[in-house]
Amino acid sequence: MTAKRILLVEDQPDHAELAVDVLRMAGYEVVHCAQGEEVLGAAQRFVPHLILMDINLPGMNGMEVTRLLHRHNETAQIPVLALTAYAMPAEKEK
């Protein structure tokens, strides 16, 4: 059986390292992107089963990246799970 593939989008090196380690120990194949601008190309090459998307990214934020992914046939059906440290009610609604 082949490992499920996860694309992790996280700009904080410590958070990314921890998440990649935990996911790989759980048997997932993981590719990491630190910037939103890298995600579309990485998703098209890697074809993940799931994208874990940090919302607060420098440059193109996670919401913008997710909209971009959904506009392309190759990536539109990949589930995207938002990751954020925001705890304010207005941020949760987004």
Image (cartoon, rainbow, N blue to C red):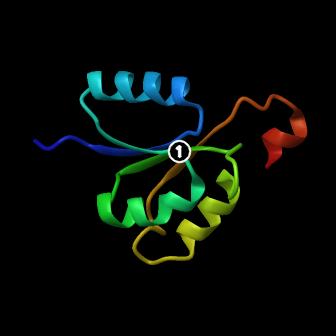
**Element carrying mark 1:** loop
Where residue 17 appears, x then y in whole percent?
Answer: 44, 26
Q: Nearer the viewer, residue 56 or 78?
A: 56
Residue 42 horizontal side relative to residue 37, left or right: left
Label 1 sits on residue: 34
Quadrant in which residue 67 is drawn: bottom right
Taking the spot 48% from the left edge, 54% from the top edge, the residue there is 79
Q: Nearer the viewer, residue 11 or 6?
A: 11
Taking the spot 71% from the left edge, 43% from the top edge, the residue there is 56
Instruction: Classify 76 as above or below 26.
Output: below
Label 1 crowd bin: few (<14), some (14–19), many (20+), radius 10 Å: some
The residue sitting at the left extreme is 1
Where residue 81 appears, x then y in whole percent?
Answer: 55, 44
Instruction: Classify 1 as above or below 37.
Output: above
> How many callouts does the rendering have?
1
Taking the spot 42% from the left edge, 66% from the top edge, the residue there is 41
Q: Could you tell me the amino acid type at mark 1?
A: Ala
Residue 27 horizontal side relative to residue 34, left or right: left
Quadrant in which residue 1 is drawn: top left
Taking the spot 31% from the left edge, 64% from the top edge, the residue there is 45
Q: Nearer the viewer, residue 52 or 33?
A: 33
Q: Nearer the viewer, residue 90 or 53?
A: 53
Where residue 50 appears, x then y in whole percent?
Answer: 41, 48
Quadrant in which residue 63 is drawn: bottom right
